[in-house]
Amino acid sequence: MKALTTATLIAAMLAMTPAMAQETASPVGLWKNIDDVTGKPKALIRISENNGEIQGKLEKLFRPEGTEQNPKCNKCEGVNKDQPILGMTFMSGLKKEGDEYTGGQILDPDNGKVYKSKLKVVEGGKKLNVRGYVGMPMFGRSQVWVREE
């Protein structure tokens, strides 16, 4: 009977391990974003944390040969107007709330618009669900980013 109890406890702990790993997985690191329209990689993004706030910076763009490899954000406004997209902090203000990071914003350099954003680390830290939206999360679009390191 004691062996059965021990085996049950071990099985329960092993079953909880993936859930616990997912809860503690951090979005900090290097990510490849996958375009939600084409399904192809668009960029490498470095996510960092500063004083409990998550931000993302564009490190590399995957652009076709013969196109500008470091375009400027011509459609952006404010401090990002006509600035190079590479190295730009385009995501900021996200703070941990439960199993998500919310309350931030994300810039789409293609159209210069800034959206509210939220993200969630999934699959034990291997993927990141990123949502940009206007008003409420149901009015937006999502991308899945894949961890690179």
Image (cartoon, grey):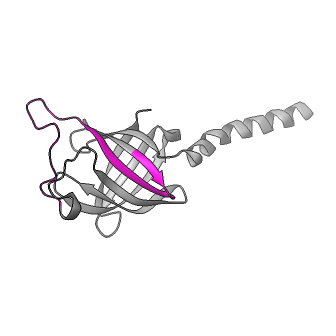
Magenta stretch: residue 60 in it? yes
Q: Quick check: 83 left or right of 100?
A: left
- x and y percentages locating residue 25 in the rendered image: 54, 44
Residue name at image x 24 percent, y 43 percent: 86
> In front here: 17 or 27?
27
| Residue 1 appears anywhere in the view | no
Relative to 112, residue 147 above or below: above
Identify the image quadrant of residue 132. Answer: bottom left
Residue name at image x 40 percent, y 38 percent: 30
- x and y percentages locating residue 79 in the rendered image: 22, 61
- x and y percentages locating residue 124 in the rendered image: 53, 39
Residue name at image x 44 percent, y 54 percent: 54
The quadrant of the image that shows the N terminus is: top right
Q: In the rendered structure, which segment of residues is drawn in magenta?
A: 47-76
Residue name at image x 73 percent, y 39 percent: 13
Identify the image quadrant of residue 70. Answer: top left
